[in-house]
Amino acid sequence: MKQVKIGIIGLGARGVVLLPSIALISGVEIAAVCDAYPERVERYLELCKKHGYTPAIATGDYKKVLEQDLDAVIVSTTWTTHVQIAVDAMRAGKHVGLEVGGATCEQDCWRLVETSQETGKFCMMLENCCYGDSELTVFNMVQQGLFGEIVHATGGYEHDLREQIVTGGERKHGRMVNFLHRNGELYPTHQLGPIAKLMGINRGNRIVSVISAASKARGLHDWARRNRPGTDLAEADWKEGDVVTTILICANGETIVLTHGCSLPRPYSRDGRVQGTLGMWMEDKDAIYLEENVPQDGSNPDGEHEWTPMAEYKKQYRHPLWKEYEAKGIEKRGHNDMDYLVLCAFIESVREGNPPIDVYDTAVWMAVTYLSEQSIAMGGAPVPMPDFTCGAWINREAERPSKYALSSVYGELFGDTEEKNENY
Ligand SMILES: NC(=O)c1ccc[n+]([C@@H]2O[C@H](COP(=O)([O-])OP(=O)(O)OC[C@H]3O[C@@H](n4cnc5c(N)ncnc54)[C@H](O)[C@@H]3O)[C@@H](O)[C@H]2O)c1
């Protein structure tokens, strides 16, 4: 197995969380680390040592990382710095694993696409939610036609981050400036990634337009007044609406509704819902409803409104990747499971090429952010989504067969073990 040498740029909270998952993957060497804050570089070197890595270079200048002999870099910096670093990395001959976040303008998306095409290096968004257990189970069921033809889906990033955002200055966290200055769907990809994959976006389908509206912005102001009275923060003028609702319209007629809300009190939700002609999945209920399960003999006249717990369907339709992952017995920490799987997909792609989330996916998912800002600025007017594939979405080459593929389930790659999905 080819040893893969990587660099990590951006050693904030996310960079730290990624490290134990990387350490579970064999054949990876962390050869360079970088952050603009020297104390974060120092802390990371300590953590690296604990995991058995000794990076040859630890620096505050990412261009020094790009001068190294590396196969790839992971970019886990702040949202508005992603694109320039990713472009420079591809030009320096490195594949890129790009942490999630949205784009600020169309040019940035084109720069990613064109640089990847020119250099032959890929830019894979590390969208871990594409590898969630429920998301992959639903994907597997959609692939087998259990939901019928898919018509509509929703997703949300609804996470009460008021304290993290308002105290972003003292915490040196990147979200704060975005909430102060922007108003849009700032974090679309956790929800959109899995939905885009099951709707075949960029592979026979595409998003054609975006409509977005924002509520007033009150939550952060209210929180800051109560928790940081008498400071500048209490009087800050936050621009990001508390609830941003975005509708995406697809070429094949589906609609997708995204909700972004990080500044009002509420429990965490990604609000997943996938609806087809034969049934639906609803994440917040952790349940599925399939028409075929309604008894036709009249024995349960109310049965048509009953949900079946997701766990029941997982017994039969869990994605073989997750069966295999569970069989490995890896201890779970936070969303370590999804992180591990997306990083496995990334490292495999560095070895084999053609990642399951390619630069066209990355560009479209990131574009939703600047397009929603434009739509909100124009009172909710529809705005067109560029076709970053320049027509190639109509008849794309099949995805490279892989356990981590996201346009198909390659059950035969999982071997003839007892973990093998009986449906393949
Ligand atoms: N996939 C997930 O589940 C998940 C979870 C959390 C965060 N994230 C993503 O990870 C990324 C980082 O998030 P975070 O919470 O660690 O943010 P953060 O603000 O805590 O850390 C970002 C770090 O990047 C560094 N940085 C910024 N520009 C730089 C540059 N030019 N050169 C070197 N270093 C630079 C900053 O100094 C900072 O330490 C974001 O894109 C975020 O959306 C993903």
Image (tube, rainbow, N blue to C red):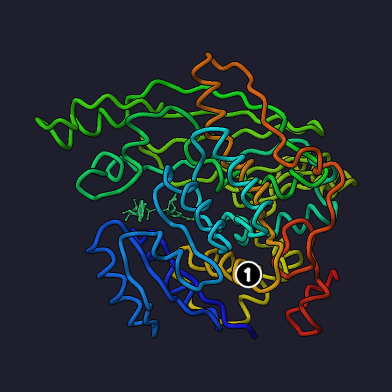
Q: Position of residue 161 (x, y in %)?
A: 35, 43
Q: Would residue 217 be found to the left or right of residue 140 on screen?
A: left
Q: Is residue 114 above or below residue 179?
A: below
Q: Quadrant of the N terminus?
A: bottom right
Q: Position of residue 316 (x, y in %)?
A: 76, 67
Q: Quadrant of residue 387?
A: top right
User: Which residue is painted at 81% across and 38% down in the image?
Assistant: 391
Judging depth in this view, the residue of 113 and 49 nearest the camera is 113
Judging depth in this view, the residue of 351 and 142 nearest the camera is 351
Judging depth in this view, the residue of 412 and 421 nearest the camera is 412
Outermost residue to the right? 297
Disc 1 secondary structure class: helix
Outermost residue to the left? 230
Q: Is residue 224 above or below residue 363?
A: above
Q: Residues within 10 Å of mark 1 (few under 14, many from 20)?
A: many
User: Which residue is painted at 25% across and 49% down in the image?
Assistant: 172
Q: Would residue 350 be found to the left or right of residue 162 on screen?
A: right
Q: Position of residue 242 (x, y in %)?
A: 40, 29
Q: Quadrant of the C terminus?
A: bottom right
Q: Is residue 126 visible?
A: no
Q: Position of residue 330 (x, y in %)?
A: 53, 79
User: Which residue is painted at 56% across and 56% down in the image?
Assistant: 91
Q: Is residue 105 above or below residue 198?
A: above
* Amino acid type of the residue that numbered disc 1 sits on in the rendered structure: Val
Q: Which residue is mark 1?
A: 350
Q: Quadrant of residue 232?
A: top left
Number of numbered discs: 1
Q: Is residue 96 visible?
A: yes
